[in-house]
Image: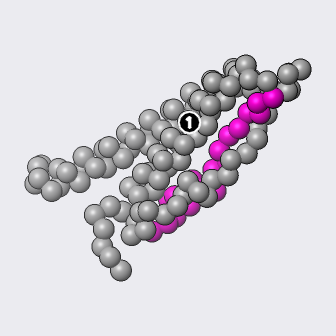
Amino acid sequence: MPIGLFDTVSAGLSRALTLHHKRHEILASNVANVETPGYRSRDLEFKDALGMAFETGAADERAPVVSEARLVDRPSGSMRPDGNTVDIDMEMARLAYNRSRYTTYAEILTRRLGTLRRAIEGAE
């Protein structure tokens, strides 16, 4: 079994960042298509994939977590007469929530890597 520099938590945080980045792209696409007739709001259903991000061993850092997340139609509200299901207020709220989770994971990972750097440098 290979010994890695990073533990399971750090690898999980990295995968979680990837998932939240992908979700941000999808939510931004919803916002961009708010006026597109027939466009259906989509989202990344990744609760199970996010759990797997932290369960997968640290040695398997390239685990295909993003491919585990399913892309689903998620109507934000009622369908408009033109067939569009995007509710701009709901999409903006989802974007803000996703951004805050991404920022939190990034900050935790940054602090963990800083601790590792200080240990390598021998700083007290």
Q: Nearer the viewer, residue 19 or 123?
A: 19
Q: Say how the picture is coloured.
A: one colour
The residue most toward the front is 37
What segment is highlighted magenta in the picture? 38-57
Q: Secondary structure at mark 1?
A: helix
| Relative horizontal placement of residue 35, taking residue 5 as reference (left or right) | right
Question: Which residue is denoted by mark 1 in the rendering?
Answer: 25
Q: Please, what is the three-letter code of the amino acid marked with disc 1?
A: Glu
> Residue 46, position in %: x, y?
63, 50
Identify which residue is drawn at 71% across, 38% down.
Answer: 42
Q: Residue at x 71, y 22 (%)?
A: 34
The percent position of residue 37, horizontal first and vertical second, equals: 79, 24
Residue at horizontal 36%, vertical 47%?
109
Q: Percent from the top left, x then y, of residue 91?
A: 67, 27
Decide: is 124 above or below 27.
below
Asked whether residue 76 appears in the rendered view, the answer is no
**Position in image of residue 50 (x %, y %):** 57, 53
The magenta stretch spans residue 78: no
Answer with left or right where residue 56 lies relative to residue 8: right
Q: Place residue 22 in its image quadrant.
A: top right
Q: Is residue 39 above or below residue 82?
A: below
Residue shown at the point (50%, 41%) measured from the top left:
21
